[in-house]
Image (spheres, rainbow, N blue to C red):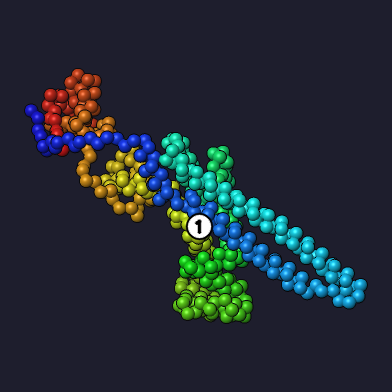
Amino acid sequence: MEMAIDTPSPSPSVSPAPSAAAGRQTRAAESVRLEHQLVRVPLEALRATARTNHRLAEKEIAAVLSSASSAAAPPGESGSAAAVDHLTSLVSRLHGLKRKMEEGARAEELQVQRCRARLDRLAAASAGDDAEWEEIRLKRILVDYMLRMSYYDTATKLAETSGIQDLVDIDVFLDAKRVIDSLRNKEIAPALAWYAENKSRLKKSKSKLEFLLRLQEFVELVKAKNFLQAISYARKYLAPWGSTHMKELQRVTATLVFRSSTNCAQYKVLFEQNQWDSLVDQFKQEFYKLYGMTLEPLLNIYLQAGLTALKTPFCFEGNCPKEDPLSLDGFRKLAEPLPFSKQHHSKLVCHITKELMDTENPPLVLPNGYVYSTKALDEMAKKNGGKIICPRTGEECNYTDLVKAYIS
């Protein structure tokens, strides 16, 4: 006797499989959307290098022209000798400028080469080998993660052994590392210099980084009991921010009264190490935005995309199977902010084989109500002479007692 759980629905028409070329085109489009930083980062680095070279050339040439106009020799041999010496120093300065411009040109050429290599990589997405493309992308994602987690040596080694130096941004992250290390050593100057280099673009994004750096420098002066210097510093660097950040300014300047030994939690926290850690995090966020990078590592984004399809309430119960990635604490932490997967149709998975039960491997119902796949129960019956033992309850029955269930 057979028991029908549901009436079988008509089989959907099978659409022809997409061609390999169409699959590559789709993958190329996805790569452009998901990995825009692949091209954006070297382009931003090229712009920064070009701006630096332009400012250097303007500054040096203006200084040389100004100095040359005042090099007119006064009467007499001594005046002529002084003019010759002056002009010789100008020529030497121009030679120095030429060397700097040549170095700048080489840096620009390197960035252009990287842009070209990355455009070629994107072009290969629609015409290259699938396995090779996926392998290179995985290595790029791993290098990106290592750089963000400060594993610079490991990231460099992986890039070198894989031959993907032009496809990753190690030099950009190393520039950021210098600022991060200085902040961890409680030094503000390198971070302020970095902000000054990128001031116009950071202002457009309404960055608060400079303000936060100035606040921390003021707090350090108070902590060192340099009160007069702290007051002068506040007048020069903090007062201009009063129109937009008055509440924060009032709180920080109150440290002149409460000092670092205070027990008042609202002000005591300003003197703690956490403030420097927050500055590091703030700098990283501004750095990522400046270069058009994702705020989260690419590895986290890809993993979360997959976990979104797997996350269900069952994954967080005590009997979550070990085969489920969400049985691991690391993946659970990544999945915390994600919504549960929306399942339009339920899927039955065999408790014994962990395989999907469908029309090719239909479910069979035991007399005690538990359901297992035909494949699993067939193998059990062959081993036990036609006997079935429920793995959950230990109850025994004959294979002929099983009832077939239908899935729509």
Quarter of the N terminus within the rendering: top left
Q: Is residue 381 left or right of residue 7?
A: right
Q: Residue at x 55, y 64 (%)?
A: 198
Residue 85 place in picture, x, y as percent? 84, 67
Q: Is residue 370 visible?
A: no
Q: Residue at x 14, y 36 (%)?
A: 10
Q: Residue at x 42, y 46 (%)?
A: 31
Q: Is residue 262 visible?
A: yes
Residue 244 place in picture, x, y as percent? 46, 77
* Residue at the spot of label 1: 291
Give the structural element (helix, strand or loop) at label 1: loop
Residue 220 place in picture, x, y as percent? 58, 71
Residue 29 place in picture, x, y as percent? 39, 46
- Residue most toward the top? 385
Figure disc tally: 1
Q: Is residue 109 above or below residue 385?
A: below
Q: Is residue 225 above or below residue 277?
A: below
Q: Residue at x 82, y 74 (%)?
A: 72
Residue in the foreground of this view, choosing between 356 and 79 = 79
- The amino acid beneath tag 1 is Tyr
Quarter of the C terminus within the rendering: top left
Q: Is residue 4 left or right of residue 304?
A: left
- Residue most toward the right? 77
Q: Quadrant of residue 101?
A: bottom right
Residue in the foreground of this view, choosing between 319 and 283 = 283
Q: Quadrant of residue 9?
A: top left
Residue in the foreground of this view, choosing between 7 and 167 = 167
Residue in the foreground of this view, choosing between 80 and 325 = 80
Q: Alpha-carbon neighbours of circle 1 within 10 Å: few (<14), some, or many (≥20)?
A: some
